[in-house]
Image (spheres, rainbow, N blue to C red):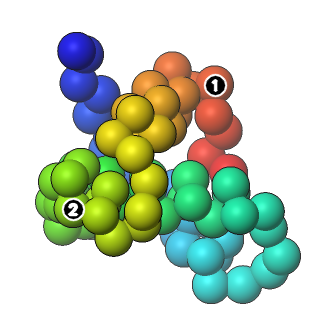
Amino acid sequence: MVKYRIALTKNERDELMSIINKGRHSSQTFRTAYILLNCDEGRYADKITNEQISQVLKVGMRTIDRVKRSFSRKVLKPL
């Protein structure tokens, strides 16, 4: 399996945090924002394993991999 590394910039992190903290968004948008923030391996984040993310957010490992793949391929805009 290919591992996708997510390293968010400060602006991308701020944009994801604003989605989580305010506004009206779909549950999929919230879930994606939480997954990306928790998968971040950049210098502005703490490292959390996919297993921990899966347990806390109640999503499957494949969902996490799909979100990471979409973001790394830039199919998924930084919300």
Q: Is 9 or 25 nearer to us in this picture?
A: 25
Q: Is residue 45 above or below residue 18?
A: above
Disc nearest the viewer among 1 and 2: 2
| Residue 58 figure quarter | bottom left
In terms of secondary structure, where does tag 2 sit? helix
Q: Is residue 58 above or below residue 42?
A: below
Q: Position of residue 6 (x, y in %)?
A: 33, 40
Q: Are marks 1 and 2 in contact (CB under 8 Å)?
A: no
Q: Position of residue 12 (x, y in %)?
A: 52, 55
Could one spot residue 10 in this view of the protein? no
| Residue 23 figure quarter | bottom right
Residue position marked by numbered label 1 in the rendering: 75
Q: Position of residue 42 (x, y in %)?
A: 25, 52
In the rendered image, the quadrant that contains the N terminus is: top left
In terms of secondary structure, where does tag 1 sit? loop
Query: Are there few (<14), some (14-19), or many (20+) residues within 10 Å of tag 1?
Result: few
Type of amino acid under label 1: Val
Q: State the residue at coordinates (72%, 84%).
A: 22
Q: State the residue at coordinates (29%, 64%).
A: 55
Label of residue 52 in the image? 2
Residue 33 horizontal side relative to residue 77, left or right = left
Q: State the residue at coordinates (21%, 62%).
A: 52
Type of amino acid under label 2: Gln
Could one spot residue 33 in this view of the protein? yes
